[in-house]
Image (cartoon, rainbow, N blue to C red):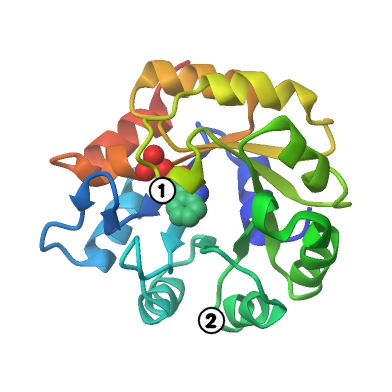
């Protein structure tokens, strides 16, 4: 394993939950509701999240690279940068900003996945290679060392689908043990959590935590749940 995020997941003794600071989504609109990203980060830290995810894409998710840098400099937890990365410069900027991991979307990078994953590793970053289908998995499995994120939603639909953990149930068994597996998106209950962690090493949750009255409380419930 390369970066801080994969190491943190492997040594995590509770449910490894990557908590996403998600300020806006095409489906639910404003998720920040006047709060400050750093306050959400602190709630996630106090609740025991294994890592933090932040979307820097601005058009559909209202993210910003400046906020990503601020989050990275404000926490000891590993931070994953989520965006529709298409250039190595963007991978390098992620490392320079203090990020620990970068999302590489198999559907976008396709045959370039192994090269981008190696480039990320050379910069000390974990690559979370995201797939939503079996044929996308073919590209991800060409990468020698990486984490594979199974997106339960179809990112091409910009999350307007609900997504559910059946995508994880279908795809995870096709991934060899050498890869760390993360189930992402559409996880909103302990039942979803239990199902996802039967097949993967960690989960990544954003909307359910951002919509909750008390993010610290709900994240702690997911982290501590006996499943
Ligand atoms: O809000 P959810 O359903 O818990 O999903 C979080 C995260 O997986 C989702 O935001 C995401 C997964 N892959 C992405 C790629 C770009 C933007 C966002 C994403």
Give the farthest residue toward the front. 157
Give the x, y percent position of residue 139: 80, 47
Give the x, y percent position of residue 66: 38, 82
* Observer-nearest of 99 and 66: 66
Q: Distance between the residues labelled 2 and 1?
A: 26 Å
* Observer-nearest of 38 and 107: 107
Q: Is residue 218 left or right of residue 187?
A: left
Decide if residue 137 is in sight here: yes
Q: Residue at x 35, y 76 (%)?
A: 67
Within 10 Å of the Cα at label 1, are there few (<14), some (14-19), or many (20+) other Cα atoms? Answer: few
**Which one is earlier in the sequence, the residue at label 2 or at label 1?**
2
Residue holding disc 1: 158
Q: Is residue 150 left or right of residue 79?
A: right
Relative to 112, is 208 above or below?
Answer: above
Q: How many labels does the image show?
A: 2
Within 10 Å of the Cα at label 2, are there few (<14), some (14-19), or many (20+) other Cα atoms? Answer: some
Q: Which residue is drawn at 35% across and 40% down?
A: 160
Element class at badge 2: loop
Residue 227, labelled with which disc? none
* Observer-nearest of 206 and 45: 206
Relative to 212, is 94 above or below?
Answer: below
CB-based contact (under 8 Å), mark 2 and mark 1 = no
Give the x, y percent position of residue 221: 32, 29
Relative to 39, is 51 above or below?
Answer: above
Residue 97, labelled with which disc? 2
Instruction: Kindly tell me whether mark 1's CB lies below 8 Å from ligand 1.
Output: no
Give the x, y percent position of residue 176: 84, 31
Element class at badge 1: loop
């Amino acid at each position: 394993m390369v970066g801080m995020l994969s190491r943190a997941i492997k040594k995590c003794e509770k449910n490894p939950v990557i908590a996403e600071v998600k300020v806006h989504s095409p489906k639910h609109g404003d998720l920040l509701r006047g709060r400050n990203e750093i306050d959400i980060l602190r709630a996630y830290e106090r609740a025991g999240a294994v890592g933090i995810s932040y979307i820097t894409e601005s058009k559909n998710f209202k993210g910003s690279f400046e906020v990503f840098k601020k989050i990275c400099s404000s926490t000891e937890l590993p931070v994953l940068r989520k965006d529709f990365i298409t250039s190595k410069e963007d991978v390098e900027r992620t490392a320079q900003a203090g990020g620990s991991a970068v999302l590489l979307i198999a559907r976008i990078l396709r045959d370039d996945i192994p090269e981008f994953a190696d480039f990320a590793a050379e910069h000390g970053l974990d690559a979370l290679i995201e797939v939503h289908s079996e044929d996308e998995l073919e590209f991800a499995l060409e990468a020698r060392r990486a984490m594979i994120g199974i997106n339960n939603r179809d990112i091409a639909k910009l999350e307007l689908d609900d997504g559910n953990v059946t995508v994880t149930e279908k795809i995870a068994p096709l991934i060899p043990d050498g890869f760390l597996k993360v189930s992402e998106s559409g996880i909103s209950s302990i039942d979803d959590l239990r199902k996802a962690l039967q097949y993967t090493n960690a989960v990544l949750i954003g909307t359910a935590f951002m919509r909750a009255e008390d993010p610290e409380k709900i994240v702690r419930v997911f982290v501590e749940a006996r499943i």
